[in-house]
Amino acid sequence: RRANWEDQRAQGVDVLPSNDFSLYDHVMDHSLLFGAVPARYTGLGLTPLETYFAMGRGLQRPAADGKPAVDVGSMEMVKWFDSNYHIFRPEIGPETQFTVSSEPGACKPVDEFLEAKALGIATRPVLLGPVTFLRQAK
C-alpha cells in the first residue's frame, strides 16, 4: 500500500484514497466492519478473516483438533444495481446490532487510514454509504 500511495502522490493525485481495495467484496467488508454478520457465521471460532471468506465462499470442514465440524454456505450474490458487477447481499434483520468491530483486522478503513498517517500520508478512506448498504440488503 505504501508504494501505491507514494506513487499516487508523485503523480499529483490531490486526494489519496485508503480502503480502496477489497480482498473479496466491498459490501461484505462493510458488513464485517459494522457487525452485520449473519448469525450462521458467528460462534464458529473463526478469525475475522476466516469469517469473511466463509461469508464469501462458504466453509465446509470436518471436526478436528477439538474444533467442531463447520458446514455453512456463502451469502447470496446479487447484481450491483443494474450493472454486471455482483456483490454479496447484506443480511439485516431485527436482531442486527450495528457496532463498529473491535476485532483485530476487522476495522480495515481505520487500520489503513492510521497506517498511511503513520507514514506521513494523508488519505481519505473509501466507504460505502449507509443508504446504499441498506438498499442492497435483504
Image (tube, grey):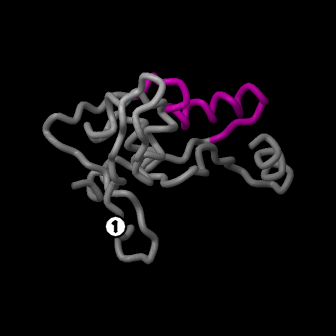
**Which x, y percent locates residue 80?**
39, 67
Residue depicted at 34% across the width and 67% down the height? 78
Relative depth, front residue between 39 and 127: 39
Question: Which residues fall within the magenta stretch?
Answer: 101-123
Please rate how many residues cluster around mark 1, counting C-alpha atoms within 10 Å: few if below 14, some from 14 to 19, many from 20.
some
Q: Is residue 48 left or right of residue 44?
A: right
Q: Which of 133 and 23 is in front in this view?
A: 23
Q: Does the magenta stretch include residue 104?
A: yes
In this picture, residue 44 sits left or right of residue 116: left
Secondary element under disc 1, as helix, strand or loop, is strand
- Mark 1 lies on residue: 78
Identify the amino acid type marked 1: Val
Q: Is residue 54 magenta?
A: no
Q: In this view of the protein, which residue sits in the foreground, 110 or 102?
A: 102
* Residue 61 image point, x, y percent: 43, 42
The quadrant the N terminus occupies is top right
| Relative image position of residue 7 (x, y in whole percent) | 83, 51
Check the image and report above or below for 61 versus 114: below
Residue 96: which quarter of the image? top left
* Image coordinates for residue 5, horizontal then vertical, percent: 76, 45
| Residue drawn 43% across the image and 52% down it | 56
* Observer-nearest of 68 and 113: 68
